[in-house]
Image (cartoon, rainbow, N blue to C red):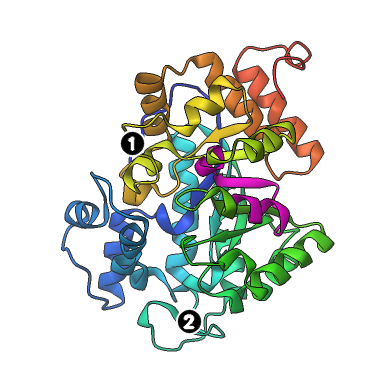
C-alpha cells in the first residue's frame, strides 16, 4: 500500500487502466466472497502470478486479465471499491490529477454481447458500471483530495460495443467522463477501420467528446496515421512506432500531438526492445509533447515512481524535464479550460515556478 512518492511532489497521469490497477488483496477478497476460483491463496502469490518481471508479448500480457477479472466483473460492490481504492493509491503516489480509463462492457454482465469472462448473465449493465465507477471515484476525490476524470474504452475486437461507448460518454459527460479511447489488440488487422469504431469516433467529434487512441505501441506507424486521420484522435496512447515514419512524426510534432508514454510497460509488453533507443528519448530530445504513465500497475508491479526512476537512471532525464512533462500533461489533459488553468497553477506553485515566467518555456 505504501507507494513511494515520486521524484516530483505533484504529478499528472493521463494513461492508466482501472482494471489494470486493482489491488491483489481486493481481487482475493471478492474471489472468495463470490466463490470464484483464483490461481492463488494469498495476495502475494496472486500478485506474482498476475504480475510480470520479464517481457511477454502483448497478447500474453492481455491474457493476464483472464486470471482475475471474473472476481470483479459483475459485482456492484467490487466495481465501486476498486474505483475508490484507485484514488487512494494515486494520492499516495503524489498524483494531483489523473485520467483513468476502462471498458464499461468488460465489467458488465447484462446487455453486453458476448458477456465477458465466461460470466453467467446478470443484471449489471455497462451504463450502471459507469455510474458505479463514478460514485467510487467521487468518494475517493472527497477523501483523498485529488482530482480524477474517466475515459471510456472501446475494444478493438468488439466494434459492436463502440456506438454504446460514445453514448455513455455523452450521458456521463457532466459526471466525470471526459473522453473516449480505443484499446485492446492493435495487431488485429484493419481494426481502426471497423465500422463500429469509426461511427463512434465520428459521433464523438460531432458531440464534442475528446478522443484518444492506443496506436503505435506494437502496431505500425500506419495504425498511428489511421488514429489521427480517420478517428481524429487528439492524443496517442503510446505512439512509439510513429518514429518509423519520419514525415508523420514531424507532422504530429508540428501539430503538438500528445504522446501518452508508458516506459516500464513498453519494456514488459515487448513494445520496446532494450537494445534500441526508447522513443521517449527522441521525444525528450525533440522537446515533443508527451507524458509519463503507468498503464497497468497491477500487472507491471509498479507505481508512477517506477517510470520516473527508469527514465532518470537509464535515459538521463532531469527534474527540469519531469516538470516540463507534467506541465505538458496538464495542458494536454481533457479538462475544460478553466479547470486546466487551475491545475497548471497548482503545478507551477508546487514546482516553485512563477506562472507568467513559464509561458515561453513550454508548449
Q: Position of residue 202 (x, y in %)?
A: 77, 65
Number of labels in the image equals 2
Q: Residue drawn at (81%, 37%), measured in percent from left and top?
A: 338
Q: Residue drawn at (80%, 38%), measured in percent from left and top?
A: 337
Task: Tell me if I can see residue 106 in this picture.
Answer: yes
**Magenta span has 232?**
yes
- Image height check: is 336 above or below 41? above
Left or right: residue 159 compared with residue 262: right
Identify the disc placed on residue 109. 2
Left or right: residue 208 compared with residue 233: right
Task: Looking at the image, tell me whether mark 1 or mark 2 is earlier in sequence order.
Answer: 1
Q: Residue drawn at (64%, 31%), measured in percent from left and top?
A: 289
Identify the disc placed on residue 27. none
Residue pointed to by mark 1: 2
Disc 1 is placed on an element classified as loop
Q: Please identify the residue farthest to the bottom as the structure is shown.
A: 121
Which residues lie in the magenta part? 224-243
Q: Where is residue 197 in the image (x, y as percent from the top left)?
A: 65, 69
Q: Quadrant of the N terminus?
A: top left
Amino acid at each position: 500500500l505504501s507507494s513511494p512518492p515520486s521524484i516530483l511532489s505533484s504529478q499528472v497521469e493521463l494513461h492508466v487502466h482501472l482494471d489494470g490497477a486493482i489491488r491483489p488483496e481486493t481481487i482475493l477478497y471478492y474471489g472468495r466472497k463470490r466463490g470464484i476460483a483464483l490461481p492463488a491463496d494469498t495476495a502475494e502469490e496472486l500478485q506474482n502470478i498476475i504480475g510480470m518481471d520479464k517481457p511477454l508479448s502483448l497478447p500474453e500480457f492481455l491474457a493476464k486479465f483472464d486470471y482475475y477479472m471474473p472476481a470483479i466483473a459483475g459485482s456492484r460492490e467490487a466495481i465501486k471499491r476498486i474505483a475508490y481504492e484507485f484514488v487512494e493509491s494515486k494520492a499516495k503516489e503524489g498524483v494531483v490529477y489523473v485520467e483513468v480509463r476502462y471498458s464499461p462492457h468488460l465489467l458488465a454482465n447484462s446487455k453486453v454481447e458476448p458477456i465477458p469472462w465466461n460470466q453467467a448473465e446478470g443484471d449489471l449493465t455497462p451504463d450502471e458500471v459507469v455510474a458505479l465507477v463514478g460514485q467510487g471515484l467521487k468518494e475517493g476525490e472527497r477523501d483523498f483530495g485529488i482530482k480524477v476524470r474517466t475515459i471510456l474504452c472501446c475494444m478493438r475486437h468488439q466494434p459492436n460495443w463502440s456506438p454504446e461507448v460514445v453514448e455513455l460518454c455523452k450521458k456521463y459527460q457532466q459526471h466525470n467522463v471526459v473522453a473516449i479511447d480505443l484499446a485492446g489488440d492493435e495487431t488485429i488487422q484493419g481494426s481502426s477501420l471497423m465500422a463500429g469504431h469509426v461511427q463512434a469516433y465520428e459521433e464523438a467529434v460531432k458531440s464534442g467528446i475528446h478522443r484518444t487512441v492506443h496506436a503505435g505501441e506494437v502496431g505500425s506507424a500506419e495504425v498511428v496515421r489511421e488514429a489521427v486521420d480517420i478517428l481524429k484522435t487528439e492524443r496517442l496512447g503510446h505512439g512509439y512506432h510513429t518514429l518509423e515514419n519520419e514525415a508523420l512524426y514531424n507532422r504530429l510534432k508540428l501539430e503538438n500531438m500528445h504522446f501518452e508514454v508508458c516506459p516500464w510497460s513498453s519494456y514488459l509488453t515487448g513494445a520496446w526492445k532494450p537494445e534500441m533507443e526508447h522513443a521517449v528519448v527522441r521525444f525528450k530530445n525533440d522537446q515533443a509533447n508527451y507524458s509519463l504513465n503507468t498503464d497497468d500497475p497491477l500487472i507491471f508491479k509498479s507505481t508512477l515512481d517506477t517510470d520516473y526512476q527508469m527514465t532518470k537512471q537509464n535515459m538521463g532525464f532531469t527534474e527540469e524535464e519531469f516538470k516540463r512533462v507534467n506541465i505538458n500533461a496538464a495542458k494536454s489533459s481533457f479538462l475544460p479550460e478553466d479547470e486546466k488553468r487551475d491545475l497548471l497553477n497548482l503545478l507551477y506553485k508546487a514546482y516553485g515556478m512563477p506562472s507568467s515566467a513559464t509561458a515561453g518555456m513550454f508548449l
